[in-house]
Amino acid sequence: MGRKSLKETRRLEIIKVFYQVAKKEGYENTSIAKIAKVMDINPSLIIHYFETKEGLTYELIDHILDRYLLIYTLKHKGQASLDDLQKTIEMLFSKKWNLLFDDGLFYTFYALAFREKKIKLKYKLILDSLRNRLALLIEQCNALCITNVDNPQVAADFIFVMVDGAYFYLSMESDKKAYSERLAYYKQKAYDTLCIPPIKVVSAPVC
């Protein structure tokens, strides 16, 4: 009970290989035949699960959302803490968050959203879901008097505007020091928006 079916497992395997091939070759140069070759399976098996490359693309975008939403795992289910909120902000403005999904593919799919209504709706779902989950986390912290944010939804939206803008701008930055400094600046602005202190970094003891 609770185990994934063979069909779900195989579909996820195909989606992950599709992502890796598209990341390496570029979305436009990725085909079902190339994915099948990497997996050492017959292309007809992929077609059996997804029918077309477009169908595979839609599933990958859904997979992106699932990966992004993992940042909202609470220590105590249904009860947010200051630590949960701080760790969420740290994750949003971290290299780990930026590496959750390849920038090149993310913006390729984003461009496709202007041509394909279904992709546009899926991207809108990703952006809205991330904002709504952060707003809910802030609301829970408000209820516990951890924060006192007047409008959690507006605050969450503002923070994600900074996140989206920061990574778009910083993707053009090749100076690692400048990148880190700007990211730290944006992160502090997020903390300021919530009126909470930054998470304390525990230094390793000096022997």
Image (tube, rainbow, N blue to C red):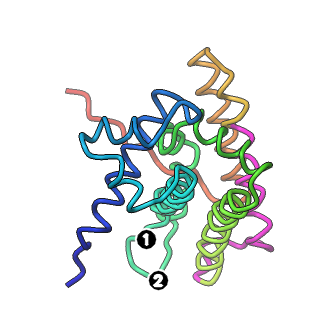
Q: Is residue 149 magenta?
A: yes
Q: Is residue 150 above or below residue 22?
A: below
Q: Which mark is residue 78?
A: 2
Q: Which residue sits at x=42%, y=35%?
A: 21
Q: Which mark is residue 17?
A: none
Q: Amino acid at mark 1?
A: Leu
Q: Which residue sits at x=41%, y=56%?
A: 47
Q: Which residue sits at x=27%, y=41%?
A: 39
Picture coordinates of residue 26, whole percent (x, y): 54, 30
Contact, CB < 8 Å: mark 2 with mark 1?
yes
Q: Which residue is mark 1?
A: 74
**Does residue 86 appear in the picture of this structure?**
no
Along the viewing direction, whichever of 63 and 41 lies nearer the viewer: 41
Along the viewing direction, whichever of 53 and 203 lies nearer the viewer: 53
Q: Quadrant of residue 168?
A: top right
**Does residue 72 appear in the picture of this structure?**
yes
Q: Amino acid at mark 2?
A: Gly
Picture coordinates of residue 104, whole percent (x, y): 59, 33
